[in-house]
Image (cartoon, rainbow, N blue to C red):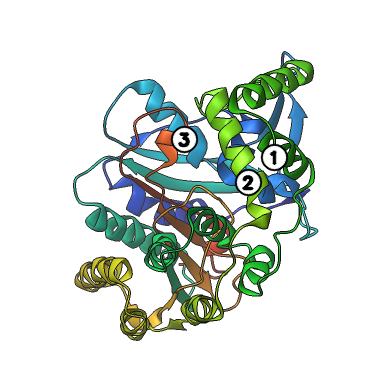
Amino acid sequence: MRLEPPIPAEALAAIRAPFAAAGAMPLDVPVLQPLALLLDLAGEAMRPRLFVVQAEGGEEAALRPDFTIGVARAHLASGAAEGRYFYEGKAFRAAGGSGRAEEFLQLGIEVYGGADAVAADAEILELAWRSAAAGGREDLFLMLGDVSLFSALVDDLGLEPALGARLKRAFGRPRLLAAELNGEAPAPAGRESRLAGLLAGLPEAEAAALLEEVWSLAGVSPVGGRPTAEIARRLAARGAEGARARLTPEQAATVRAFLALEAEPVAALEALERLGTERLAGRVGQWRRRLELLDEAGLPLGQARFGAGFGRAFGYYDGALFEVRSAELGAERPLAAGGRYDGLAGRLGGVARGAAGCMVRPARAFAEGWE
């Protein structure tokens, strides 16, 4: 496992300082997190990057790959409607396809609640930028995006519900998205695909009973607070999707034009407006305000790019997102990252409220010769 080199205490203090001044409550979360829950919320694509261990009682667990899900669970357990939390500690990623298993220091902030989501997004992004910049690197730039823009575009296309849901799930997964755009049948997804196909051919009550039996034999239980019947319906719907509608050539062209958009933020928003869809235009208006707030805060928007197709590996993001990158380190090693995940609490069985946060990796932010 690759361990990060230590950084000077004064450099770490400077990187931490923007969060320390943000009025957040310090919070730690368990190093071991339930594996099934992580996969349900972050997506199966994360499995190769997780360190899987056998927890006490035989349940499979994983070393925390980041803090967001753990903080969300702690917030829900507190019963509070709103909360601001600061965390600092080690996170862990297995090698996956990168060949770099890592144990690394991560710090960040998570904010739950608040009436003004756009202002909260701007605040989180400003904190991440100032924290990353405090490490002394001079080659930083911002990558901006928004998962909800793609969802708005898909909704405006007026697609059959199953096709629209399939497209939204494929966002950020190039192979699946390319298959949809090329009119190809979705590729089988292993055991889940076979089970989904079986459930699709059964009445709802029988499908739920079969799912309960599978869980009983495997010694597992559902996560996220959803009833068995609801999970069975969702799996059955996925099993039936393969034979359903495909994008027309015109619709595919619109999606391709959207995904290809990457430019400085104002130009990118203007290009998105020219796509001419109603819901998308409303989301673009929110982004104009975000940029105004960031400009007022003094962030260098001349060092920013907006990518309509930009997404992140963690599947719980459902709104604005960003990364602070270094030209030297490249896109695969962001210094800071974050965004909005309003639906995460609801998926954990709580009440879905506004939620946004970010993390910084101090060892990446630190530049040799920092003073």
Residue 205 position by quadrant: top right
Q: Earlier in the sequence, mark 1 or mark 2?
A: 1
Q: Left or right of 113: which side holds 233?
A: right
- Percent across and percent down for residue 332 are 63, 67
- Distance between mark 1 and mark 3 Cα atoms: 20 Å
Query: Residue flagged by tag 3: what amino acid is it?
Result: Arg
- Percent across and percent down for residue 36 are 65, 32
Residue at image position (68%, 55%) is: 242
Residue 352 position by quadrant: top left
**Which type of secondary structure does the marked residue at label 1 adopt?**
helix
Mark 3 closeness class: few <14, some 14–19, many ≥20 residues within 10 Å:
some
Query: Residue flagged by tag 2: what amino acid is it?
Result: Arg
The residue carrying mark 3 is 347
Q: Earlier in the sequence, mark 1 or mark 3?
A: 1
**Residues tagged 1 and 2 counted as in contact (Cβ below 8 A):** yes
- Percent across and percent down for residue 72 are 44, 34
Residue 34 visible to the viewer? yes
Q: Earlier in the sequence, mark 2 or mark 3?
A: 2
**Which type of secondary structure does the marked residue at label 3 adopt?**
helix
- Distance between mark 2 and mark 3 Cα atoms: 18 Å
**Which type of secondary structure does the marked residue at label 2 adopt?**
helix
Q: Is residue 23 above or below residue 14?
A: above
Query: Residue flagged by tag 1: what amino acid is it?
Result: Ala
Residue 149 position by quadrant: bottom left
Q: Is residue 75 above or below residue 364?
A: above
The residue carrying mark 1 is 196
Q: Is residue 202 above or below residue 317?
A: above
Numbered badge on residue 238? 2
Mark 2 closeness class: few <14, some 14–19, many ≥20 residues within 10 Å:
many
Residue 103 visible to the viewer? no
